[in-house]
Amino acid sequence: MARRAEKGKTKDQEPQKLFYIFYNEERWTNWLTSLNEADFEGDSESEQMPEGLAMLYIFSEDITLSVLKIIKLWQNERFSKEDALDKLTAVEAIVMSPLPEGKLEEFVGPIQLTMLVLFASCRRFMEGAFETDLKVLVKKGKSLPEDQLEDALDCASNIGASVINGATCCSKFVKDDLENPTLFDEWLIEIETMGEAFKSLKKFDEEPGESS
């Protein structure tokens, strides 16, 4: 069953002016610098998560929240759909940019793969038509061979768009696969994060000039 998302503005309504500073190259570079300097090994005798791994989680959440703010601001009629898609594409180009070999490639590379579902879901949501039978979509996505990446991403982006639109997913579908998750499982985990992040933006409406 397909569903159409609520559009961010009426046909003849001009979007409000906005001077919000979106996720940019400087922010990305600062994160990469911090991650490159972080300790990912930690103390073998300590139960604490290594600094680098904890930072990686915050880094990933920061991207997710920043991207979803674009969707929320579009819903709040701050800019047109075309402008929102342009901003989404600009952030995607930064997040998916090539990484230097070494530690960053090892730890940030997998996050880039995970973020594929974030950008695909946002686009599908903005286009307005997506499948909403989550159980069927999850079953189909989990059954696909790993080399059918595009088909799996298509399934996952439908799920992600539904979650942005208010559906609940996906922890119950991955609770048994956390030790050896597939890429599709990683996408479901990211979609769960997206759902929580978008809920936190319920009353979000940035003041001009803010950069958080």
Image (tube, grey):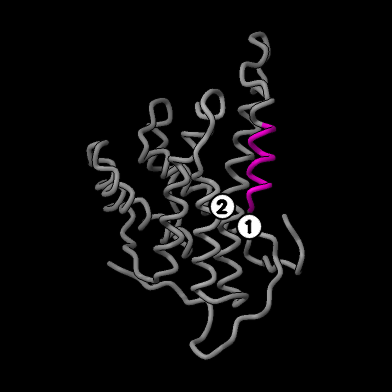
Q: Which mark is residue 77?
A: none
In the rendered structure, the answer to whether residue 168 lies left or right of residue 20 reads left
Q: Report if residue 31 lies within the magenta region.
A: yes
Q: Quadrant of the N terminus?
A: bottom left
| Image location (x, y in percent) of residue 42 | 66, 16
Task: Give SS at disc 1.
Answer: helix
Question: Is 72 above or below relative to 105?
Answer: below
Residue on which disc 1 sits: 200
| Image location (x, y in percent) of residue 129 | 35, 69
Question: Is 112 above or below relative to 122?
Answer: above
Q: Residue furthest bottom?
A: 12
Q: Which mark is residue 196?
A: 2
Q: Quadrant of the C terminus?
A: bottom right
Which amino acid lies under the numbered mark 2 shown in the image of this protein? Answer: Glu
Q: Report if residue 33 lies within the magenta region.
A: yes
Residue appearing at x 43%, y 30% in the figure:
178
> Residues in magenta?
24-34
| Image location (x, y in percent) of residue 59 | 62, 40
- Between 165 and 29, the one nearer to me in the picture: 29
In the rendered structure, the answer to whether residue 55 lies left or right of residue 169 reads right
- Between 10 and 98, the one nearer to me in the picture: 98
